[in-house]
Image (cartoon, helix red, strand yellow):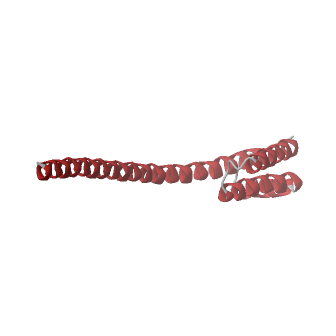
Amino acid sequence: MLTLLLVVGALLTLIFVITKVRKSEIKTSDTVFWFLMALFLLILAIFPQIAYVLSDVFDIQSPANLVFLAVVAVLFIKEFLASVEIAKLRSKITYLVQEIALLEETSSDSSAQREEEEVQSEVIVELREE
C-alpha cells in the first residue's frame, strides 16, 4: 500500500509540475525542488527497504510514519522559505510604491511649476505688447 501511495504521489507531483512549467507559472528553483521531491518519493517506492531501515534507526513505529514525517518536515521548511520570500517581496513592493508616489509628487510639482512659468511668461509678453 505504501509503495502504491508513493508512486501515485510522485506521478501526480510530476504531472502537476510539468503542467505548471508549460504554462510558465512556476520558477525554475521551485521546479527543481518539486522534481527532487517526486524523485525522493519514487526512490522510496522502488526501494522500500530504505524506509524500513530508517524507521528502525530513528525508532519510528512504521515506515509510513517516517515517510509522512519526512514529507511534512520538508514541506514545512519549504513553506518557511516561501514566507521569507513573500516578506521580502512585500517590503520591495512597499518601497516601490513609495518611490512611485514620490516621482508622481515631483512630476505634479514640476508640471504645476511649468504651468505657472508659462502663465508668467504670457503675462510678460502681454505687458511688453502694451
Nearer the observer, 26 or 47 = 26
In which quadrant will I find the N terminus?
A: top right
Q: Residue at x 83, y 53 (%)?
A: 42
Horizontal and vertical percent for residue 30? Answer: 66, 55
Horizontal and vertical percent for residue 25? Answer: 68, 47
Q: Residue furthest front?
A: 130
Nearer the observer, 102 or 67 = 102
Instruction: Give the quarter of the image for residue 12.
Output: top right
Question: Is 94 on the left-hand or right-hand side of 9?
Answer: left
Q: How many marks?
A: 0
Q: Residue at x 83, y 57 (%)?
A: 43
Horizontal and vertical percent for residue 45? Answer: 85, 51
Q: Residue at x 85, y 53 (%)?
A: 48
Horizontal and vertical percent for residue 40? Answer: 77, 56
Question: Is 34 on the left-hand or right-hand side of 92?
Answer: right
Q: Residue at x 78, y 52 (%)?
A: 38
Nearer the observer, 120 or 93 = 120
Question: Is 89 on the left-hand or right-hand side of 105?
Answer: right
